Amino acid sequence: MDVPTNIARSADVVGSIDDLLIQILLHLPVKSLMRFKLVSKHWKFLITSRRFSLLRYPAPNPAVGLIYPRPQSSQYDYIHLGTKKPTNPPFKKLSFPGNPYPFWIHQSCNGLLLCCSNVNFDIRYSRSPIRMCYVYNPTTSCFKNLPRPGVLHGVPRIVHGLNLAYDPAESPLYKVVCVRGSEFARELCQIEIYSSVSGAWRVSGEPFTATADFDHGVYWNGSIHWISYQTKEILYFDVEKEKFGKVGLPAAATLGDDVRYRHHKEGRYISYFGESCGHLHIIGNHQSYAAFDVYEMKVDYSGWFVVYQVDLTAVAAALTDMSYVVRLSNRIHYSFTVLSLVRNDEKGSFLILLVPCTTVRFNLDCNTYEEICDVGGVAAVNHRIPLAFDHIESLACA
């Protein structure tokens, strides 16, 4: 059947006017965009351009969902932050073509996931050494296999941590920062940087000593940030300048000898450390209190300030499984985990809390809450941060 001449001409006009074509493409779902990249080289150029990506997902771009691993499993569950209805997750198990080994998510950064494997079929109990890394975009299913990190002259060194550095508002390129053991002394560390431009690792700076938790870093303000639990400081590394800096933790968030884990001596512990829409946050909890402060770091690193004061007493009263009495002390303790803090100027900022058998969305602006997802047998108490990883929609090519 022949297409009428006037319709064909209209299609040609739309196809030849980039601004009009972009406006049409912006309203299409991601799966359709991936198919339309194959229409022509010009369409692929438009869809993969930085301009189109920023129009589609203007900064700041809040998380639309949370990905978290099932206990004692290599599979993942998903919480969609915009609806109570079940949503198809971007994946249920991490796998890459030609690679049979299971992977875990090491970090989420502005739409990209850093996925690692120790080339072992059982990753439930040991995640070292890291032998394989992928940068993966779950929105587009694009991925990149990185060279093994921490290898010096063919000899692998101990990898203390890996961290993505990616800000789509600044550049479509990304880097990965590796903290590995130095070849000069066991107590020394060495920074290596992978660039998506060169596709290779290179050494940065001189060996150094530090006691930070390099296994969990947060990218914000152009730097990777790690918590030093021994010195009660934040150690940060400026990725562009390749220089270190330090800033103290909020004093009220660091009481107790071991603030990282929940099974420490009774006291405060750091339950959340993360970034959302250009804001760096840290939360210190106490097992015996349902109230806590949310701290935010100033952009110039001059100090922390309390951005939100949270009281979960009403939540605990409604969800009775959230509190319990400790027999020895006859004190009430609260069982919850902060999965994520999402800043959203348009719809309101909120916390996602994991409590026994359910998740709660707590609005930080008006102190209201709602249950958003039944998580079944997922444990409400976890000894590591982060427990969940932000899913931020992005068209970035890994």
Image: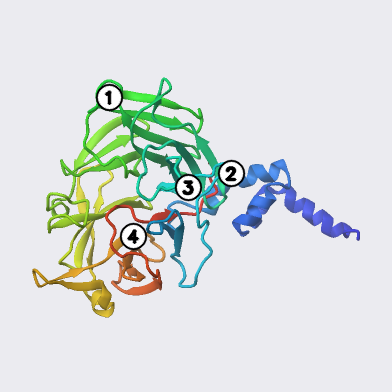
What residue does disc 4 label? Answer: 339
Q: Amino acid at mark 1?
A: Pro
In this view, the mark in front (3 or 4): 3
Q: Amino acid at mark 3?
A: Pro
The CA span between labels 3 and 2 is 12 Å
- Expressed as whole percent of the image width and height from the top left, the position of residue 222 reads 36, 39
Tell me if residue 297 comes above or below residue 148 in the rendering.
below
The residue carrying pointer 1 sits among few (fewer than 14), some (14 to 19) or many (20 or more) residues within 10 Å by Cα, namely some
Q: Quadrant of residue 167?
A: top left
- Expressed as whole percent of the image width and height from the top left, the position of residue 88 reads 53, 64
Q: Secondary structure at mark 3?
A: loop
Q: Is residue 334 left or right of residue 84?
A: left
> Which mark is on residue 112?
none
In this view, the mark in front (1 or 2): 2
Q: Amino acid at mark 2?
A: Pro
Contact between labelled residues 1 and 3, with CB atoms less than 8 Å apart: no
What residue does disc 2 label? Answer: 97
Label 4 vs 2, first from the N-terminus: 2
What residue does disc 1 label? Answer: 207
Residue at 26% x, 78% y is 320
> Is any atom of residue 47 visible in this view?
yes
- Expressed as whole percent of the image width and height from the top left, the position of residue 309 reads 22, 64
